[in-house]
Amino acid sequence: MVSTVTPAGALGMLAPPFDLPGVDGRRHTVASARGPNGLVVMFICNHCPYVKAVIDKIVRDTNELAAHGVGSIADVPSVAECVARLREEYTAAARDLTRAEHWPASLASS
């Protein structure tokens, strides 16, 4: 059985420099993603059943974090066909994610 509880991440770590293409057509860096009070970096898989089940909660939580000055970014380390699947399956969610300045949903290059 898959765990439905995500362990707390290590707080206070410095993010290494990154420059990722986003589903919104823009490039995203640490500087463009972080808020004045920090940055949450998520590594998610767009075809993972758990991610599919909680995508609305991820959007909700990142919106709440943004209200507290914490930026968020999600990295989907997938190949090109997964990018296409993300656009097909999460069109509405991706639109919501990329519409908000504080959430640049990003995809790693293959």
Image (cartoon, rainbow, N blue to C red):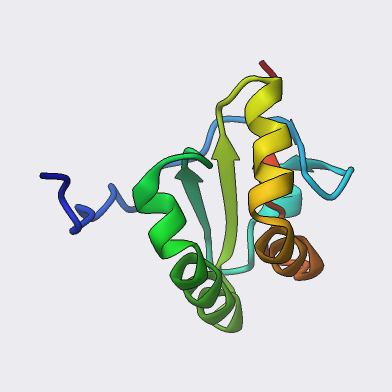
Of residues 24 and 87, which is closer to you in this image?
Answer: 87
Q: Residue 26 sits in which quadrant?
A: top right
Q: Quadrant of the C terminus?
A: top right
Q: Quadrant of the N terminus?
A: top left
**Residue lying at 44% horizontally and 72% vertically, measured from the top left:** 57
Q: Is residue 99 left or right of residue 73?
A: right
> Which residue lies most toward the top here?
110
**Residue lying at 89% horizontally and 43% vertically, measured from the top left:** 25
Q: Where is residue 35 shown, x and y percent of the image?
A: 64, 65
**Residue lying at 41% horizontally and 63% vertically, measured from the top left:** 54
Q: Where is residue 101 shown, x and y percent of the image?
A: 78, 67
Of residues 3 and 65, which is closer to you in this image?
Answer: 3
Q: Is residue 58 left or right of residue 49?
A: right
Q: Is residue 5 above or below residue 3?
A: below
Q: Is residue 25 left or right of residue 71?
A: right
Q: Residue 30 sits in which quadrant?
A: top right
Q: Residue 37 sits in which quadrant?
A: bottom right
Q: Where is residue 86 shown, x and y percent of the image?
A: 66, 43
Q: Is residue 76 above or below residue 9?
A: above
Visible residue check, residue 12: no
**Residue lying at 51% horizontally and 75% vertically, measured from the top left:** 65
Q: Is residue 19 above or below residue 5?
A: above
> Which residue lies most toward the left here?
1
Of residues 97 and 62, which is closer to you in this image?
Answer: 97
